Image: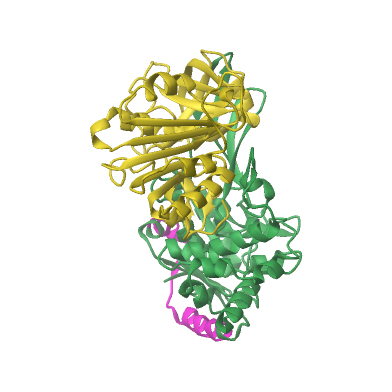
């Protein structure tokens, strides 16, 4: 029995850096006590983070697999565990296990494609891993377009990296938008679904979308009206998870377990599942 | 085949208990549940069913997974010790015996649940054929033979004699350990009982339950049936059906500070509860209709779709007896099957 991995038993992690991205989002850098990355992962995969006595939950790994030094998690303060995580100081230990989930098909279906990333708010967290992965293997992917919207310019996660790295790179077009006009903001103002209509997008793009359900719903409608097929669009899902290995039953949707069979699905795959996510 | 007289059965239990931990149906506070054998335990082999199913023996109601020690910013993790001694579960009926192989497909599928695996590895199942099935029994709908259950050893009680036959290597090993209290026997009495019980089984009201609708129609078509609303309208969301069910395997994981450290334990949970899928931003199954439908879709549609046609039900009938509003899987199956044919 000893050779079988103990899936539910986490390893230890140490928080080595905390970045306050927005008023309610912080990005935590995590390594093992020995200073290593806890495990290898692919873009879009997740990890279970926990504070003993508070709880354990699934978070997408926002750093790219090409970063071999540490993992990063961009976490919005929105519940019991995330409140606690936001109170942490550098040096705090957490527990971590993973990687879980299928991730985005960067090695197969996305290879060689022109990619369009559409994110809203904290929805950038799982996509940032893919974006930085594709930037690292730049010659294996076509054009990269990024549409990212949030409530205000203060709510854009990873704004520094977006401005200093993504916006300055050839072959990457970044389209930022905020919901309402704001002093100091000379970029686009408006919601993501409407912005998609204004950009003259070519229909050859493969789309990765993540954000609030309402944003995804209306953006998808507009994309389809423009002529995109549901087979061209991928998203990543969020459901309650306790085990992460397809057994505790919480994330079961239809015949799928989102923790194991997902969290990444194409919309034509989601169409085959009951609409209860 | 081996045998021992029922009025000497304590000799068999003592022989097993001398070498292994023995669990069997015992009466406590008027209810029969699997419990540890002792000289003064009120063993109830005559009870057709325990209140909770025998899954408790391999997937306990609650179990500690690990312990944390927290000091300032430092944490250490200590995995809980797993079951490492052999144990015998005696008197498992055919329905519960089948439930183990259904649970195996969940917990032993990659990645393996090591806590469950340890119990399965060390547990020996001694099943017991049914001699008096009840009107709520419908195991035959799932191809289960109540007169010859699965298990490492199968036993029959007929005319005051308990008959014993090993079916696996584990069963043969146990048989060797208790051979001195068992005598050789022919199988005439067992065969006679099997024939008589099979005749009763055929006449049980739910014996002909037809579930083919659930494996022949598309998942979404069944999901969208309007009857779910009426079927679930009286459901209290109490979760009793899930707790007595031999195949319900959903669980919760929680932390508990015991004053000396933090225990992380898991316990049975129920998809019938609102909290089950609750996240910080809300739950994806907001009404009892959705939660009720999830339970039955899982058992009747998703399970067979994922596991070569095997349903997540063994026809034990516990939920038929225990539901406070008299709703159950048979009513769901019959209602949807009937409407489905008309559609």
A206 left or right, relative to B149: left
- Give whichever of A231, B103 is nearer the camera: A231
From what the image shows, is residue A91 above or below residue A226?
A: above
The quadrant of the picture occupied by the N terminus of chain A is top left
- Give whichever of B161, B248 is nearer the camera: B248
Residue at point 58% right, 15% down? B71
Residue A177, visible in the rendered structure: yes
Residue A118: image location, x then y, percent:
46, 39
B66 left or right, relative to B109: right
Chain letter of the green region:
B
Residue A122, visible in the rendered structure: no
* Residues in magenta, as a range: B173-201
Residue A218: image location, x then y, percent:
55, 48
**Number of marks in the rendered image:** 0
- Give whichever of A144, B84 is nearer the camera: A144
From what the image shows, is residue B17 above or below residue B83?
A: below
Asked if residue A185 is among those painted magenta in the image, a careful observer would answer: no
Within the image, what quadrant is residue B199 found in?
A: bottom right
Q: Chain A: what color?
A: yellow
Residue A79: image location, x then y, percent:
65, 32
From what the image shows, is residue A9 above or below residue B131?
A: above
Residue at point 65% right, 30% down? A80
């Amino acid at each position: 029995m000893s050779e079988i991995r103990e899936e539910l038993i986490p390893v230890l992690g140490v928080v080595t850096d905390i970045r306050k991205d927005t008023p309610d989002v912080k990005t935590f850098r995590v390594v093992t006590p020995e200073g290593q990355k806890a495990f290898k992962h692919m873009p879009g995969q997740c990890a279970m983070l926990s504070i003993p006595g508070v709880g354990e939950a699934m978070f997408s790994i926002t750093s790219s697999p090409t970063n071999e030094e540490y993992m990063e998690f961009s976490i919005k303060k929105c519940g019991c565990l995330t409140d606690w995580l936001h109170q942490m100081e550098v040096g705090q230990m957490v527990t971590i296990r993973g990687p879980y989930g299928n991730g985005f098909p960067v090695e197969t279906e996305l290879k060689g494609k022109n990619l369009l990333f559409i994110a809203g708010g904290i929805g950038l967290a799982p996509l940032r891993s893919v974006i930085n992965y594709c930037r690292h293997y730049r010659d294996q992917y076509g054009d990269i377009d990024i549409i990212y919207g949030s409530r205000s310019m203060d709510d854009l996660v990873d704004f520094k990296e977006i401005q200093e790295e993504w916006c300055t790179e050839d072959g990457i077009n970044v389209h930022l938008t905020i919901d309402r006009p704001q002093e100091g903001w000379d970029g686009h103002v408006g919601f993501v679904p409407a912005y998609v209509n204004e950009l003259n997008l070519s229909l050859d793009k493969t789309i990765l979308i993540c954000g609030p359900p309402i944003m995804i719903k209306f953006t998808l409608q507009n994309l389809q009206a423009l002529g995109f097929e549901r087979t061209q669009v991928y998203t990543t899902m969020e459901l309650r998870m306790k085990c992460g290995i397809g057994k505790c039953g919480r994330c079961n949707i239809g015949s799928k377990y989102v923790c194991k069979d997902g969290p990444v699905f194409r919309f034509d795959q989601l169409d085959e599942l009951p609409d209860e996510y | 085949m081996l045998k021992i007289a029922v009025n000497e059965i304590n000799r068999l239990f003592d022989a097993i208990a001398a070498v292994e931990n023995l669990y069997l149906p015992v009466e406590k506070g008027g209810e029969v549940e699997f419990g540890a054998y002792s000289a003064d335990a009120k063993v109830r082999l005559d009870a057709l069913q325990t209140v909770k199913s025998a899954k408790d023996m391999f997937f306990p109601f609650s179990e500690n997974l690990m312990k944390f020690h927290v000091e300032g910013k430092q944490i250490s993790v200590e995995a809980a010790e797993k079951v490492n001694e052999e144990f015998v579960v005696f008197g498992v009926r055919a329905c519960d015996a089948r439930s183990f192989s259904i649970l195996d497909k969940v917990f032993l599928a990659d990645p393996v649940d090591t806590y469950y695996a340890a119990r399965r590895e060390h547990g020996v199942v001694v099943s017991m054929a049914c001699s008096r099935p009840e009107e709520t029994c419908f195991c035959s709908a799932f191809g289960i033979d109540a007169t010859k259950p699965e298990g490492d050893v199968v036993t029959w009680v007929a005319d005051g004699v308990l008959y014993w036959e090993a079916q696996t290597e584990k069963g043969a090993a146990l048989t060797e350990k208790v051979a001195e209290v068992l005598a050789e026997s022919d199988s005439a009495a067992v065969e006679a009982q099997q024939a008589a019980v099979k005749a009763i089984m055929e006449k049980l009201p739910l014996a002909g339950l037809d579930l083919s609708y659930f494996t022949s129609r598309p998942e979404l078509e069944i999901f969208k049936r309007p009857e779910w609303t009426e079927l679930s309208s009286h459901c209290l969301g109490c979760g009793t059906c899930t707790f007595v069910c031999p195949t319900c395997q959903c669980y919760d994981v929680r932390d508990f500070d015991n004053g000396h450290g933090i225990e992380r334990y898991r316990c049975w949970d129920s998809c019938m509860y609102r909290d089950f899928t609750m996240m910080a931003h809300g739950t994806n199954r907001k009404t009892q209709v959705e939660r009720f439908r999830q339970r039955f879709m899982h058992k009747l549609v998703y399970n067979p779709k994922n596991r070569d046609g095997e349903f997540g039900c063994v026809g034990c009938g516990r939920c038929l007896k225990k539901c406070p509003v008299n709703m159950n899987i048979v009513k769901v199956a019959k209602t949807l099957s009937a409407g489905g044919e008309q559609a």
